[in-house]
Image (spheres, grey):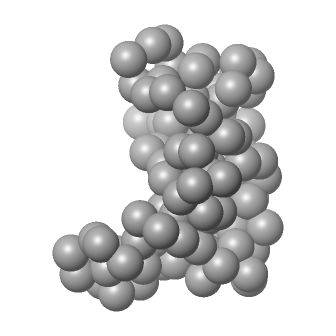
Amino acid sequence: MNLLTKNNAFCLLIDVQEKLYPAIFEKEILLKNIQFLLNGFSTLEIPVLATEQYPQGLGKTIVALTQHQPLHKIFEKQGCPMAHSSGSYTGGYNYNFHTYVI
C-alpha cells in the first residue's frame, strides 16, 4: 500500500472561485470539507496546487482557502484541461508525482 507523501503526491483544488462559489449547493459544507483536507495536506507537507478558470471574470480562489495556508501554485486556465493529459492540470510543469488528489 502506497501512502501519500510530499515526495509522491499533490492535491489539486479546481476552480473554487469568488464568483462561482455563491452558486454552489451546500457551499458551507463543501468549504468545511476542503479546509479539513487542506489542513491534512499541510500537516503532511503535501503541496496543494489550484486552478482558476478565467480569474479576470470569475475571480480568484476564495480567500477562505488561501488566507491560512498558502497554495503551492495557482494555474490560470482558459480552457478545460480535463480534456487533455494530466500534465495540463499543472500548466505543463512536471511535478513527477505518482498520486494526484483532486
Q: Is residue 17 above or below residue 95?
A: below
Outermost residue toward the front in this view: 57
The answer to whether residue 75 is above or below residue 18 is above
Q: Residue at x 38, y 17 (%)?
A: 83
In this view, 40 is above or below 4 = below
The residue positioned farthest toward the left in the image shown: 25
Judging depth in this view, the residue of 53 and 3 nearest the camera is 53
In the picture, measured across the screen, residue 44 lies left or right of residue 16, that is right
Residue 79 appears in the rendering:
yes
Image coordinates for residue 82, horizontal then vertical, percent? 40, 25
Give the position of the N terminus as an image quadrant.
top left
Residue 11 visible to an observer of this rendering: no
User: For the C terminus, which image quadrant?
Assistant: top left
Q: Position of residue 49 (x, y in %)?
A: 66, 48
| Image side of residue 95 versus residue 59, left or right | right
Q: Position of residue 35 (x, y in %)?
A: 52, 77
- Which residue is located at x 21 percent, y 75 percent? 25
What residue is rendered at 41% in x and 65% in y? 20
- Image: 62 above or below 79: below
Quadrant location of residue 69?
bottom right
What residue is drawn where x is 52% and y is 64%? 17
Query: How many numbered marks have been drawn onto this rendered protein structure?
Result: 0
Q: Position of residue 71 (x, y in %)?
A: 74, 59
